[in-house]
Image (cartoon, rainbow, N blue to C red):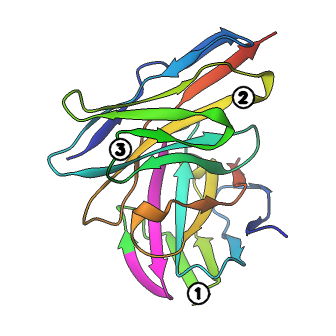
């Protein structure tokens, strides 16, 4: 039983395309996140949802749009993909908004834009 | 603004030797402190965390870290490493009252036979 699962694991696509990454957690957590890890392994938060409500929206291009149909799912849709969007995208969840709980991460989606 | 610095991008060490991975942070407010480990092609896994209380924190897989407020450091240690400890280690801080993690750039620990 995977706690935080992301699909797809790998995604190769051409510039200008629109793609989605799905994330599901079966831990009963209230809060979910999207992080981007660049080629230098630097991790940066993109979005956070708590009980389907957006609570963190960092300076991310409008081409990125998160959607949370319920508190167990947080999907990421990317429009008009650019070369610079190539990265590993991690979904994570935590029991609450407080970071004292720590996160449970998914195994990542490696996006390559060609 | 807050920041996290991991001074060593790579640390090679022989099996059964001790290791210390360094982490320093900068913050104008109190923070929670964390270490995460990332094995190849996997997501991050929480190793340990400091919230309050004793400054020496023990985590999984025999790792421990010590919070030093005066030096704003949270170094990770293990007295004897195994080949299986080869991974990327990330230090992170969360300023109290915010909903953010700030991660360091990671330290690649390579354990040699």
On whether residue A53 falls in the magenta region, the answer is yes
Q: Position of residue A50 (x, y in %)?
A: 46, 82
Neighbourhood count class around disc 2 (C-alpha, 10 Å): few under 14, some 14–19, many 20 upward: some
Return the residue nearer the eye: B49 or B102.
B49
Q: Position of residue B75 (x, y in %)?
A: 42, 28
B48 left or right of A86? Answer: left
Q: Distance between the residues labelled 3 and 1?
A: 34 Å
Stretch of the chain drawn in magenta? A42-55
Q: Name the residue under label 2.
A: B85
On residue A71, the disc is 1
Q: Name the residue under label 3.
A: B54
The reply to whether the C-beta atoms of the residues labelled 3 and 1 are less than 8 Å apart is no
* Residue depicted at 79% across the width and 64% down the height: A8
B30 left or right of B55? Answer: left
Q: Is label 1 or label 2 in front?
A: 2
Return the residue nearer the eye: A95 or B88.
A95
């Amino acid at each position: 039983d995977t706690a935080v699962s992301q699909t797809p694991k790998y995604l190769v696509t051409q510039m200008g395309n629109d793609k989605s990454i799905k994330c599901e957690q079966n831990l009963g957590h209230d809060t979910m996140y999207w992080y981007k890890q660049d080629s230098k392994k630097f991790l940066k938060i993109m979005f956070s949802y708590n009980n389907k409500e957006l609570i963190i929206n960092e300076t991310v291009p409008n081409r990125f749009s998160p959607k949370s149909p319920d508190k167990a799912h947080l999907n990421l849709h990317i429009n008009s993909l650019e070369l610079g969007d190539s990265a590993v995208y991690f979904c994570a969840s935590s029991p609450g908004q407080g970071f004292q709980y720590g996160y449970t991460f998914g195994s990542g989606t490696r996006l390559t834009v060609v | 603004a807050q920041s996290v610095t991991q001074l060593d991008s790579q640390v090679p060490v022989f099996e059964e030797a001790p290791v210390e991975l360094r982490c320093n942070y900068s913050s104008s407010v109190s923070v929670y402190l964390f270490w995460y480990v990332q094995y190849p092609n996997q997501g991050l896994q929480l190793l340990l965390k400091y919230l309050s209380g004793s400054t020496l924190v023990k985590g999984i897989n025999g790792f421990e870290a010590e919070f030093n407020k005066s030096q704003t450091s949270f170094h990770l240690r293990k007295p004897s490493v195994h080949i299986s400890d080869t991974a990327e280690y990330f230090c992170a801080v969360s300023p109290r009252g915010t909903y953010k993690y700030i991660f360091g750039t990671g330290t690649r620990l390579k354990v040699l036979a």
